[in-house]
């Protein structure tokens, strides 16, 4: 991530020369097409600098100046500027520059001659046409907003006669008209209006304009015009002087703020934001532009003054000399200017802004917060204190003290109110308006805001509040001297560290880290600050898992932060609404346990255990995971510390309380909606309890009225077995791990194993078969009497892995899990394979895995059999090398399990999978093949007797791309030369020709045809075309009723006929009667293909053989045709086919050819087959 950011960060304006060259093309003139390409390229370049637009500043004069010169020519001669000219591209270019750098920066480089005012305005008026691009008008407005700031009376540059409208009036009217626009012209018109009305010589036009706006706002103005009007008023009250604006306040603009149209558009966030912005600017006009003398000030704005004071002051007096602290309110009142009159309307303004802090949209709250800060900065101290009091009361709205915990309950508060209030506090603090004596009231609320998280259904809200609280802490660092914040440093530092590493949102973690870094740099009193900011930086906190597991662990090594981090995980994160957060919390607690194991035994586990059986499933889930991971971590600590082991064993009550958690879980939590999460956690807890070897104990059920006591281990096993029968795969995974841990720590009986085998054999337990198949693979069978169970276990698993006859029992997941179970057994048995399994058991296992490689079961999810095939290949990846090594160490050939024929059979099946249509299957097969071929190459040990190994190693290399058809198929076709693998590999290539992707079909079929074209027609020494044809016929025979293979085979055969490849066999076979008879059988098989063009070609070929020179061939073909007609379905039988049958049976096909040719020709029409047209032979020169 860090590398990506640095790669996109530029150090200077790289494209300056290219932009100048492109700009020269636009200025000198060009055709429309070239101009459009040029402007597109300019847009691409400028977009690159959107985030670093300041790099353009040194070049802006050269980028804007020449364009303005050219545009002035158009302004002076508007007739040369037509809608079809490329001059509009210059305006579009200027807009792109303003979009990237901002109009305020760009407009400075435009000309501002007095003589330009009227021509530019006339040019703008001439552009009032829908065919003119809007960028042209927008740039004209921006340009005019600069020109109209000339320090001359505009009436003097007005050329209009006394009977005509003045230039000022026309400009105002044009701006009013464009305020209705839906595009950027509205913004430009508002800016020009503000610049005009802020002039002293046009001050008398301001009040009429305000009256016009009120009339339009109360009239039929649409949302676009309202937005334009409010934007223009905001600009007016920003740019105009206070003397000009004061007469318009009470009777002019104040009534506008409370007009009824705001209620009509209460759902429009932009209008609400503009109202808030206008309100704050009106409020600023009521107050003199001065900075409150009562504010808190840290140091001086001048760096030189600060440095001078630092040189002249001692270290102990630094804070006193550089900080102005007025703690006594009486002293503040004396310095305050109490003679200043404050209008009553200011109360209305502040009320609107404070209500804006509650707004549902962030842009409105942010504008209101800035307004509160700016206005408070000009208020007398007494009124400012009232504002701050009300602001702090916003935090208290709808809060209450929980009777059970005596803690503050924030469940009913508004997140919008807290966000707005936090932003306002940050603005006040940043300006020194939140005096030091207020921090004691404020900081506790900000600490609550740092961890603000309200659950709402299946999610929570509050990330924006936490982000704003980080901004408050950041502003504290910049506003106050270290001596002021010293009493609060511990609380702030710990809270910021906790949020930095444990918050769910990446932006909040980074914001908290930035606030902590700011405090470390400016305050210098945060504990271990430098060390922590090196650990928790922008990039390390970008990944949530890294923050929880690595950064938090390193920070927790500092004693000041260990307990806050642990307590936050225990009290907050383990109860988080997001499951992934609860899982991370448990994993983080596991790592933190190693730092304070006694603390976890004495305090954390006793506190957590009761919540593990909570009715709230989120609390129960997170707590159980936390208890499980802590117990697991304590086991590792106990192994290395005998004293800790003895201390743990002395905690009998705690151990029993943890061990009884599965018994005390509410039964509803195990069956209701969301129970899968509880089962995951409880299985993980049982697994960890088995790993740490918690002793089995008796649980008294008499208190619950359930009769006799029950052993805790029985409760655990019942829960694990019921979870194994759940349909959720993730639950089964946790249950399988727990099953294996129990079997390893507490043992397993023969009855339990055979009960599992019975459930695997049952066709009713579809989901149970999946779970128990995996579970049996986790049992260690090398212990004493368990060895005798293994043949039965492998036999049941092999049976469960095969395609089942019943549709319900043919479950893909169950078959896949059975193969995975076999793989786990093979891995666990290892070198003792031959001691526990006989050769017959091995052959049955190998045959089962080989059959699994031909599982092509499908359902609504697609080729689910591929899961079984992939699992089988991974199992063979472990089995074959293991048996190969064991065979190599055997003294006699009779003791060897794996023969060369078995190896060839398995490799042929793997090669078939390596050219299958699914990328994932090909990749899996290729990985297994490479592993079997090259795994022992470094030691020169070849345990497997692989036929044609040299050929395989020649074409199957380690760097082959199995997922790329273009790279794979040209290579794999060469392996067809190896006879042991030919049939299976050819079948795989054929089936890939029926894939769904165009590239797969094209490469698989074309590579096969190209390879066959390069083969000799017949050869006794190498692969020939005849051999390939026999294999194609064999595929027809073996896969007669499987469309998955037959349909792509027909397509390939059609291509082979079209390319003339198979025609070579036919020509060569004319003199070989055995080849001809074999060919007729192939054609006969093709006639059974309904609706295929291959069928028509096959019948045509058979009819042509009725005139063959050899009578035996003619007789054989007539028999084949008769067979074809006699097995036709009822709907296919016609009068023509019946008559054709009589002709075929009633004709002596051994008669001379001239006699039977007319009879043969009749069969074309009767069988509805077009008679082929013979092409004239081309004479060779």
Image (cartoon, rainbow, N blue to C red):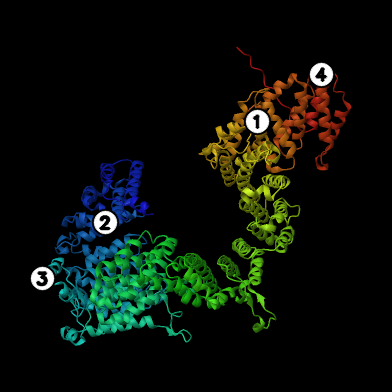
Q: Percent x, y for residue 317?
A: 15, 75
Q: In this orientation, which residue lies closer to the viewer: 623 or 996?
A: 623
Q: From mark 4 to mark 1, how far is it between C-alphas? A: 30 Å
Q: Nearer the viewer, mark 3 or mark 1?
A: 3
Q: Which residue is mark 4?
A: 1153
Q: Secondary structure at mark 3?
A: helix
Q: Nearer the viewer, mark 3 or mark 4?
A: 3
- Name which of mark 4 and mark 1 comes first in the sequence: 1
Q: Percent x, y for residue 341?
A: 20, 84
Residue 201 appears left or right of 765: left
Question: Which image quarter is the C terminus in?
Answer: top right
Q: Residue 344 sits in which quadrant?
A: bottom left
Q: In this orientation, which residue lies closer to the viewer: 12 or 149?
A: 12
Please tell me which residue is depicted at 33% across the width and 66% down the height of the picture: 228
Q: Which residue is mark 1?
A: 1056
Q: From mark 2 to mark 4, how far is it between C-alphas? A: 95 Å
Q: Nearer the viewer, mark 4 or mark 1?
A: 1
Question: Is residue 786 at least partly visible in the picture?
Answer: yes
Q: Percent x, y for residue 519?
A: 28, 69
């Amino acid at each position: 991530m860090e590398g990506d950011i640095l790669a996109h960060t530029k150090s200077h304006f790289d494209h300056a020369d290219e932009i100048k060259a492109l700009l020269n093309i636009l200025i000198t003139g060009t055709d429309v097409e070239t101009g459009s390409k040029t402007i597109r390229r300019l847009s691409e370049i400028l977009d690159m600098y959107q985030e670093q637009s300041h790099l353009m500043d040194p070049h802006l004069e050269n980028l804007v100046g020449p364009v303005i010169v050219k545009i002035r020519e158009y302004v002076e001669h508007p007739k040369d500027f037509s809608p079809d000219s490329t001059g509009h591209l210059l305006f579009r270019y200027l807009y792109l520059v303003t979009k990237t750098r901002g109009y305020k920066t760009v407009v400075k480089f435009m000309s501002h001659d007095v003589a330009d005012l009227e021509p530019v305005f006339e040019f703008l008026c001439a552009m009032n046409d829908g065919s003119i691009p809007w960028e042209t008008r927008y740039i004209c407005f921006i340009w005019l907003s600069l020109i109209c700031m000339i320090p001359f009376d505009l009436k003097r540059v007005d050329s209009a006669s006394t009977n005509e409208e003045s230039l000022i009036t026309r400009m105002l009217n044009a701006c009013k008209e464009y305020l209705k626009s839906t595009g950027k012209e509205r913004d430009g018109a508002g800016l020009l209006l503000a610049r005009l009305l802020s002039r002293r010589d046009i001050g008398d036009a301001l009040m009429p304009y305000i009256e016009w706006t009120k009339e339009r706002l109360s009239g039929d103005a649409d949302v676009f015009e309202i937005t334009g009007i409010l934007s223009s008023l905001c600009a007016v009250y920003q740019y105009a002087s206070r003397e000009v604006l004061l007469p318009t306040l009470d009777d002019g603009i104040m009534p506008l703020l409370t007009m009824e149209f705001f209620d009509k558009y209460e759902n429009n966030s932009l209008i609400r934001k503009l109202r808030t912005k206008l309100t704050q600017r009106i409020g600023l006009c009521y107050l003199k532009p001065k900075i409150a003398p009562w504010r808190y000030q840290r140091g001086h704005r001048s760096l030189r003054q600060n440095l001078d004071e630092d040189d002249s002051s001692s270290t102990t007096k630094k804070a006193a000399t550089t900080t102005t602290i007025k703690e006594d309110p009486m002293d503040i009142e004396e310095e305050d200017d109490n003679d200043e009159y404050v209008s009553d309307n200011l109360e209305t303004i502040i009320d609107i802004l404070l209500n804006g802090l509650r707004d549902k949209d962030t842009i409105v709250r942010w504008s209101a917060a800035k307004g509160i800060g700016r206005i408070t900065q000009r208020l007398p101290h007494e009124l400012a204190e009232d504002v701050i009091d009300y602001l702090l009361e916003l935090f208290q709205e709808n809060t209450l003290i929980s009777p059970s915990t005596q803690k503050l309950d924030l469940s009913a508060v508004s997140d919008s109110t807290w966000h707005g209030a936090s932003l306002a506090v940050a603005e006040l603090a940043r300006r020194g308006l939140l005096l030091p004596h207020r921090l004691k009231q404020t900081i506790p609320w900000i600490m609550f805001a740092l961890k603000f998280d309200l659950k709402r259904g299946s999610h929570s809200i509050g990330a924006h509040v936490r982000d704003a609280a980080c901004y408050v802490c950041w502003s504290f660092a910049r506003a106050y001297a270290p001596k002021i914040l010293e009493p609060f440093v511990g609380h702030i530092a710990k809270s910021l560290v906790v949020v930095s590493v444990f918050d769910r949102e990446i932006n909040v973690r980074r914001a908290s880290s930035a606030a902590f870094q700011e405090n470390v740099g400016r305050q210098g009193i945060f504990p271990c600050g430098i060390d922590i900011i090196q650990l928790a930086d922008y990039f390390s906190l970008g990944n949530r898992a890294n923050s929880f597991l690595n950064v938090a662990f390193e920070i927790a090594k500092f004693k000041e932060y260990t307990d806050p981090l642990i307590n936050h995980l225990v009290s907050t994160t383990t109860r988080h609404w997001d499951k992934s957060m609860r899982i991370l919390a448990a994993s983080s607690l596991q790592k933190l346990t190693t730092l304070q194991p006694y603390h976890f035994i004495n305090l954390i586990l006793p506190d957590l255990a009761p919540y593990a059986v909570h009715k709230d499933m989120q609390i129960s889930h997170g707590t159980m995971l936390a208890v499980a991971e802590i117990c697991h971590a304590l086991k590792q600590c106990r192994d290395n510390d005998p004293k800790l082991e003895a201390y743990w064993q002395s905690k009998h009550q705690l151990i029993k309380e943890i061990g009884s958690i599965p018994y005390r879980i509410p039964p509803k939590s195990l069956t209701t909606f969301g129970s899968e999460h509880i089962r995951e956690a409880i299985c993980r807890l049982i697994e960890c309890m088995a790993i740490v070897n918690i002793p089995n104990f008796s649980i008294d059920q008499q208190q619950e009225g359930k009769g006799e006591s029950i052993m805790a281990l029985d409760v655990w096993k019942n829960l694990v077995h019921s979870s194994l029968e759940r349909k959720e795969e993730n639950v089964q995974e946790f249950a399988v791990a727990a099953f294996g841990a129990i079997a390893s720590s507490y043992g397993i009986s023969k009855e339990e194993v055979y009960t599992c085998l019975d459930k695997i054999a049952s066709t009713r337990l579809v989901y149970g078969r999946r779970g128990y198949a995996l579970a049996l693979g986790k049992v260690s069978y090398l212990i004493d009497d368990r060895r005798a169970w293994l043949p039965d276990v492998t036999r049941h698993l092999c049976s469960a892995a095969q395609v089942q006859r019943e549709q319900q029992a043919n479950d893909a997941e169950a078959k896949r899990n059975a193969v995975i179970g076999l793989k786990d057994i093979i891995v666990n048995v290892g070198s003792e394979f031959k001691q526990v399994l006989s050769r017959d058991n091995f052959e049955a296992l190998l045959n089962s895995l080989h059959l699994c490689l031909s599982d092509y079961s499908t359902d609504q999810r697609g080729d689910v059999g591929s899961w079984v095939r992939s699992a089988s290949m991974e199992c063979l990846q472990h089995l074959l090398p293991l048996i190969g090594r064991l065979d190599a160490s055997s003294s006699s050939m009779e003791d060897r399990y794996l023969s060369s024929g078995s190896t060839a059979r398995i490799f042929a099946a793997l090669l078939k999978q390596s050219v299958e249509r699914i990328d994932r299957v090909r990749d899996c097969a290729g990985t297994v093949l490479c592993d079997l071929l090259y795994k022992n190459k470094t030691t020169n040990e070849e345990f497997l007797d692989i036929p044609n190994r040299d050929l395989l190693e020649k074409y199957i290399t380690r760097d082959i791309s199995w997922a790329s058809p273009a790279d794979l198929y040209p290579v794999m076709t060469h392996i067809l030369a190896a006879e042991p693998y030919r049939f299976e590999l050819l079948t795989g290539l054929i089936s890939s020709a029926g894939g769904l992707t165009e590239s797969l079909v094209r490469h698989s079929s074309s590579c096969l045809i190209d390879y066959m074209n390069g083969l000799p027609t017949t050869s006794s020494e190498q692969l020939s075309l005849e051999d390939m044809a026999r294999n194609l016929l064999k595929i027809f025979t073996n896969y007669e009723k499987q469309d998955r293979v037959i349909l792509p085979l027909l397509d390939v055969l059609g291509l082979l006929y079209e390319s003339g490849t198979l025609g070579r066999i036919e020509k060569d076979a004319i003199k070989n009667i055995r080849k001809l008879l074999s060919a007729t059988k192939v054609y006969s098989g093709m006639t059974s293909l309904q609706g295929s063009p291959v069928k028509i070609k096959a019948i045509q070929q058979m009819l042509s053989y009725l005139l063959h020179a050899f009578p035996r061939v003619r007789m054989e073909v007539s028999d084949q045709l008769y067979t074809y007609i006699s097995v036709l379905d009822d709907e296919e039988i016609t009068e023509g086919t019946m008559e054709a049958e009589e002709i075929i049976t009633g004709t002596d096909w051994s008669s001379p050819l001239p006699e039977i040719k007319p009879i043969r020709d009749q069969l074309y029409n009767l069988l509805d087959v077009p008679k082929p047209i013979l092409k004239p032979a081309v004479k060779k020169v």
